[in-house]
Structures are given as C-alpha cells and as structure tokens.
C-alpha cells in the first residue's frame, strides 16, 4: 500500500491484531493479574484504532473480556461519536456481572458528555452492588455539572450500607456548599 512505514508500524503495533492479542492475554487463565492489567491498559491506549475488535469483545460472553472492552470504548464514543459503541456502553450498565457494570459506570463519567450521561449515572446510584453505587455517587460529585442534592437525599433515605451513606452525606454537603 502507499502508507508511510511509520503508519504501517503503528497499525501493526496498535491496530485490530494487537487488540485481539491483548484480549487473548486477558482471557488466558495462565495470565497473571499484572499481565491482564497491562493488557487492559493496552486496550485503552489502542482505543479507536481497534474499533471492530473492541465492539466484538464488548459483546463477549466472557465478563473479563467484556469489561475490558467496555473500558476501552471511550475514544470511540467521545471522539468518533460512535453510536453503536455508545449503545454497547449503555447495555453494559444493565449487565448481570458487577465488573462489567462497574467499568461502564466509570466510563460514563470519563466521557465528559454530561448531557446524555446524567440519567444513566443517576440510575447507577441504585445499583445492587455497593461499590458501583459508591462509584456513581463520586462520579456525580466530580462532574460538578448539575444540582443533584434531592436525588442524593432520596437515595440516602433508602441506603443501608454505612460506607455508601457516608459518601452520600459527603456529596450532599458538597452540593450544600456550592
């Protein structure tokens, strides 16, 4: 082809094939947690250069693969405005596996697209998983984009976990101080 050698090298290192190899590392039971962590990091770095592999992985039956792919969809959603990737992210918020929902919640906050993310972040403060609820509440505080005090106060009335209650109180106090 007429691509410069540098571009060929970058595509070989960071393209679809590289993403598929990183996904194999994550899926391999012989991989250490450090190797899997580095593979997940690498997928995030590759981002949109491997959009097909990430889309396929986001629909995987393997929770680890699916979570890693969801975490890496940010560039596709934010910069390429990939609506299919956005759909995969929103579906992941309802996944049966906590790890997948957790990654989806984290990605929602990192996207900096609060206009459409707000209702989904609000939904995750009612997730059955305590850690996901904490992450959602902290994400809403960090976004500092909307007044959510009433929603957080409503959640405080039904929350049973002491750690989540503490985070809710911090969030409510934060919005009081604005």
Image (cartoon, rainbow, N blue to C red):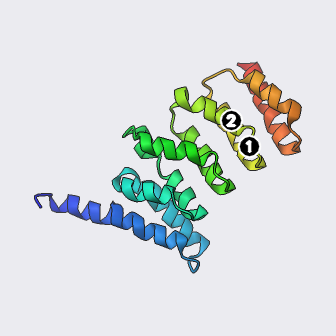
Going by the image, does 137 lie left or right of 31? Answer: right
The answer to whether 85 is drawn above or below residue 40 in the figure is above
Going by the image, does 84 lie left or right of 109? Answer: left
Asked if marks 2 and 1 touch (Cβ < 8 Å), the reply is yes
Going by the image, does 12 lie left or right of 37? Answer: left
**Residue 118: % across, % down:** 60, 29
Instruction: Judge by depth and name the residue closer to the eye, 127 or 170.
Output: 127
The answer to whether 131 is drawn above or below residue 26 in the figure is above
SS state under label 1: loop
Residue at the spot of label 2: 123
Tell me the residue at 87%/44% (across/down): 161
Going by the image, does 43 lie left or right of 133? Answer: left
Tell me the residue at 44%/58% (across/down): 56
Whole-number angstrom distance, CA of label 2 to CA of label 1: 7 Å
Residue at the spot of label 1: 127
When asked about the image quadrant of residue 29, the answer is bottom right
Q: Is residue 44 visible?
A: yes
**Residue 138: % across, % down:** 69, 38
**Residue 12: % across, % down:** 28, 66
Crowding around mark 2 (Cα neighbors within 10 Å: few <14, some 14 to 19, many 20+) is: few
Quadrant location of the N terminus?
bottom left
When asked about the image quadrant of residue 120, the answer is top right
Quadrant location of the C terminus?
top right
Q: Is residue 138 visible?
A: no
């Amino acid at each position: 082809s007429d691509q410069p050698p540098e571009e060929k090298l970058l595509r070989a290192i960071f393209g679809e094939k590289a993403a598929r190899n990183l996904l194999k590392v994550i899926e391999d039971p012989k991989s250490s947690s450090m190797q899997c962590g580095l593979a997940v990091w690498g997928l995030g770095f590759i981002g949109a250069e491997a959009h097909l592999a990430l889309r396929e992985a986001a629909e995987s039956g393997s929770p680890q693969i699916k979570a890693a792919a969801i975490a890496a969809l940010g560039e596709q959603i934010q910069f390429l405005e990939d609506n299919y990737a956005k759909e995969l992210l929103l579906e992941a918020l309802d996944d049966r596996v906590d790890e997948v929902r957790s990654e989806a919640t984290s990605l929602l906050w990192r996207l900096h697209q609060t206009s459409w993310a707000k209702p989904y972040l609000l939904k995750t403060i009612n997730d059955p998983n305590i850690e996901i609820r904490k992450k959602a509440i902290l994400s809403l505080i960090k976004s500092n984009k909307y007044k959510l005090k009433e929603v957080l106060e409503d959640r405080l009335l039904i929350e049973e976990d002491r750690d989540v209650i503490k985070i809710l109180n911090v969030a409510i106090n934060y919005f009081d101080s604005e």
